[in-house]
C-alpha cells in the first residue's frame, strides 16, 4: 500500500467544520482520506499553520512553495512524489493516485482552501 502525504494550507484544523462557515469540501476531503486509510494506505497530513517545520524539511514542498507561494497548496504526495497540487482531488482521483495511476490534474475539482470561513478563519476554533 502507498503512503499519501498532504501538505495543507494554513487553517485552524483539517476537518473543515470549525469557524463561522464550515467548509463542506474540506469535510469531504477528510472523509476521502479516511476512506484511503480504510483501504490500507497510510495517510499523513500537515497543516502549514501548525506544522511549518514539516514543510521546511521537505525540499520538494519547500521548492514548490518558493515557486508558487501558497497557491501550490494543498500538495499531495504519494510515496514521496508529488501527484497533485493547488487543489483538493476527488475521492476517485485520490484512489487513483494511491494506486499509482495517472490522473488529469486539469480536470481535478477545484476545491480551494477555506477562505472567509471554515478552517481558514481567523479565530474561534
Image (cartoon, rainbow, N blue to C red):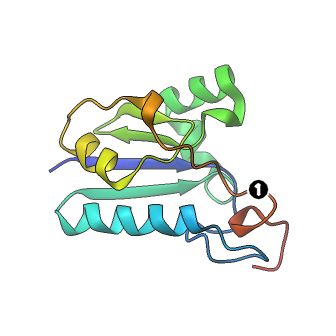
Which residue lies under the disc numbered 1?
A: 115
Which residue corresponds to the image point at 43% horizontal and 41% vertical from the top-left? Answer: 76
Q: Is residue 53 left or right of residue 35?
A: right
Q: Looking at the figure, which quarter contains the C terminus?
A: bottom right
Q: Is residue 80 above or below residue 27?
A: above
Q: Quick check: 114 left or right of 25? A: right
Quarter of the figure with residue 118 = bottom right
Point out residue 97 in the picture as x, y percentages from the top left corner.
28, 41
Q: Residue at x 46, y 61 (%)?
A: 29
Quick one: 49 or 16, which is closer to the camera? Answer: 16
Count of numbered circles on the image: 1
The vertical placement of 121 against 6, above or below, is below
In screen coordinates, is 28 left or right of 35?
right
- Within 10 Å of disc 1 (Cα), the crowding (few <14, some 14-19, many 20+) is few
At 80% from the left and 66% from the top, the residue drawn is 121
Q: Position of residue 23 (x, y in %)?
A: 64, 67
Which residue: 34% across, 35% down? Answer: 80
Secondary structure beneath dot 1 equals: loop
Amino acid at each position: 500500500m502507498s503512503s499519501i502525504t498532504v501538505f495543507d494550507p494554513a487553517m485552524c484544523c483539517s476537518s473543515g467544520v470549525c469557524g463561522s462557515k464550515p467548509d463542506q469540501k474540506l469535510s469531504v476531503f477528510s472523509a476521502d482520506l479516511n476512506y484511503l486509510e480504510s483501504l490500507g494506505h497510510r495517510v499523513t497530513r500537515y497543516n502549514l499553520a501548525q506544522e511549518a517545520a514539516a514543510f521546511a524539511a521537505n525540499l520538494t514542498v519547500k521548492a514548490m512553495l518558493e515557486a508558487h507561494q501558497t497557491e501550490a497548496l494543498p500538495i499531495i504526495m504519494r510515496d514521496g512524489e508529488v501527484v497533485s497540487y493547488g487543489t483538493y482531488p476527488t475521492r476517485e482521483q485520490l484512489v487513483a493516485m494511491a494506486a499509482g495511476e495517472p490522473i488529469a490534474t486539469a480536470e481535478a475539482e477545484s476545491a480551494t482552501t477555506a477562505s472567509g470561513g471554515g478552517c481558514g478563519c481567523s479565530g474561534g476554533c
